[in-house]
Image (cartoon, coloured by chain):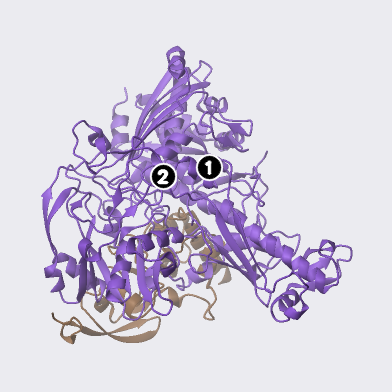
Amino acid sequence: MTDTSSRENHLLITLDVNGEQHEILVEPRRTLVDVLRHDLGLTGTHVGCEHGICGACTVLADGKPVRACLMFAAQAEGTALRTVESLGDGCGGLGDLQQSFTEHHALQCGFCTPGFLMLAEGFLAECPDPEPDEIREVVAANLCRCTGYQPIAEAIGHCAARRLKEK
Amino acid sequence: MSPTAPHPAPAPHGTHGSPEGDRLVGRSVRRREDPRLLTGRGRFVDDIALPGMLHAQFVRSTVAHARIAELDLDGIREVPGVVAVFDAADLGLADIAARLDRPLHEFVPTDMPILARDRVRYVGEPLAIVVARDAYAAEDGIEAAKVRYDILPPVVSDTAALAPGAPLVHDAAARNTLVDVAMFATEGIDDVFAAAPCVVEVHTTTGRQNALPLETRGAVAAWDAKEDQLVLHTCTQTPHQVRTVAAACLGLDERAVRVVVPDMGGGFGQKCVVGREEIAAAAAALRLGRPVKWIEDRKDALTASFLAREQRYDVRAAFAADGTILALDADVVCDMGAYSCYPFTAGIEPLMASAEMPSVYKVPAYRVRGRAVTTNKAPTAPYRGVSRPQYVMVVERLMERAARELGIDAVEIRRRNVITEFPYTGVNNITYDPGSYLESLDLCAKVLHDEGWYAAKEQAAAEGRHLGIGYSCFSERTGYGSTAFAARKMQVVPGFDISEVRMDTTGALTVTTGTQNHGQSHETTMAQIVADELHVDLGKVRIHQGDTERITYGWGTFASRSIVVGGSAVQRAAAKLGAKLVALGAHLMDAKPEDAELGAGCVRLRAEPERTVSYERIAEAAYLRSNLLPDGIEPGLSATASFDVFDDGTFSNATHGVVVELHEGTGRVEILRYVCVEDCGVAVNPQVVEGQCRGGIAQGIAGALFEQITYDAQGEPSATSFMDYKVPTAWEIPDVAIHHLETPCLFTTTGAKGAGEGGTIGAPAAVLNAVNDALAPTGVELDSTPITPETVQRALESRP
């Protein structure tokens, strides 16, 4: 039996996640989401389908939402990655987007939630004053089995409105 | 009865509670689950990593029906990273045996092996467990399996299963029939049909679906040498039942199995039955002396987990000329797939449909035959609604068809038939507690009228567009107690729940319940109930679930039982602790217990309410200064109580009204408006109830319009990814307007009824009726789901 931990088949990569640099040795086939979750311990990002449809694994790469199940970790070198663990008020409390989600009951089981949060975070950065139809279109990128989507769309819209007001 | 007033403003996260008089039940308190789930600090089963942990995947059958001629696993052992592989013979586990107490002509017992032994019965059936250093290597290992099959002819539909001379899925089950019950043959029912001025028929099939929790199934099993115990972390809705089966299959004392449930990413019924893979993972962990994790991938979840919903109804109903229903005669066949599920058995669906089909209507004569057939498809589990989405669809079709034949308005014919006087004991021997069947129907119709949808429909017709309006009126039995499940003749009878409420020396409360949250917000709603009972801040209450070592016993969460049964057990335990607090508090004030009562976080004297003793002081006495305790009062502050429902449960009800537009050319069904008027008694947390409604409706729409697992003639499943199984997104699921009515439950202290499944139950019927209303000019009527674009387009093209 050959030893899979032999370094020959592995790549030494550096990932920039939530502002921290991580040097890791990975198999070339190892997906970004598995590295985030199982090698870096950032288990907030979830895996729902492993084929890019459900969006539970959505993270930001250089500010843009990407499916972390569809990327090899090695492909993410050189991009600034952000996961759900980076959201928040910086003191362990909820950020405004998260606050809006809880106010609107935009999560039930919470499994898809980190994906929706990162999707919305990327979207609102690019489109700070969205129309309801634009929000609906973005929300349609990911799957949720609990909420019926309406509260998620409302939460994102409400967060956008609050940010605009506070500007 | 009228709609409830607007909900009071939400309270923030659990930090502020309710002082006395300011009740939390009935308020949309912010969910206490949310902060961790929003910050990535939830802990789901795949987030668990134990030292030395290995990863398992399964070699699965690639054919639907065969004898296993040869299972060669040697190649797997050569794959780098693979640590071990076990087949059925290696593990020697007992089968999972689900039973009904019924004679053989009504129920044929079949067992589900943990790993297939000599025969496979569906594509995806597990043959061997591969354990490897990581999940990648485990999947590499699967590729190296060599299996030689002696192919048997597959049975891939209910009609094929029942055909004379059909191959047998289980040798013991003649005609592939696992359950066959005939019930309620009202005397003279044939004469009623013969004499009736109007007899309508509906022939319905509903597609096979996947309940589809976004988190697939999974488990982490490890032996805890210190406790001399297997610890099985698994995402289940029924932890104690998993413990029972795990102990039985593994040959362990039940004491030696601890089931722990982490955060769960949904379940919807798929996770309320015991899965063979979680037991196999546990067996592998015991064999290897190392923790083993199994996480189901999406392909396995779609093809090889528990599926749901595939049923056939051939039903006729007799009506009087004025639209009064006279009789209902039904034949129900449920395609349960390859095995009976534990603990419910293959009887779960036909027995539900047979017992409850008369629905919200005064049906004077009823006859039903309910059957469960076995086929070479993945087995089924209960899925949110359990047969009710189907039979409600059938009964609501019958109503609309009779209305059309008799020239009566579709709402009016329902008005003439719904139960209006309660309690009402039906022809099915079920007693219905008070509800708002007529009121919900009238309000829903009024909303659609007032919003101008009837005018819009006429306008659209004038423009050559196809708008339709449809309704469903239904109830949902919630809080099934042990007598209700015993009536189904289950050998393992769910029903009661046990709760413990414990106060620590700081006055903080630890509450256990045997229910199992997987999205329903129990950590919030159950805490609201306790906080009210003991007049404490919500922040003082912590709800604990999902650990068989910590929870005395419970039946988990399914059948919309949690707030009714679990909530009542929690409330009773809290009340019992309250009585002890009063006794102790009174003693500390040199008063008699009968002269004292609970105040806000204290015990006070009834006659002098300013004289109080705080919970903290009472708790100090109970634990740290027990020398202060009076004779006859034991140290410590905890109370345990149980609750069961000994009558027919409590019925929530609702009416759904839907407006659709059918798009010519594509056959697309667009939902323009969705109105839900629901009544689940007192809503403990209205925002949570609305969430249950919306989410349920989305799943009902999914079944009505989009989702279906199909099989080819060889029994090969065609939906193996989300590219082939259309889960609706925010584009397809509309906003839902929810109106509340409130007919309190008479036997729960809160007045709450269950609210978990109604949305899913009502949506398919309302959508189908709306589509048929839009198709009325074509003369085509559809009775089955999913309603595909192709069906709709063909119907539109067929119009004269």
Residue B36: x and y in percent read 50, 71
Residue B229: x and y in percent read 40, 73
Q: Nearer the viewer, residue B80 or B221?
A: B221
Q: Is residue B532 visible?
A: no
Residue on which the image places disc 2: B701
Question: Does residue B11 appear left or right of residue B478 in this picture?
Answer: right
B677 relative to B225, above or below = above
Q: Nearer the viewer, residue B31 or A62?
A: B31
Q: Is residue B713 visible?
A: yes
**Helix, strand or loop at mark 1:** strand
Q: Which chain is brown?
A: A
Query: The disc numbered 1 marks a residue on which chain?
Result: B
Residue ID at (61%, 51%): B683
> Chain B is shown in which shade?
purple
Image quarter for residue B670? top left
Residue B352: x and y in percent read 44, 39
- Tally of marks: 2
Q: Amino acid at mark 1?
A: Arg
Residue on which the image places disc 1: B477
> In this view, which residue lies farthest toward the right?
B607
**Helix, strand or loop at mark 2:** helix
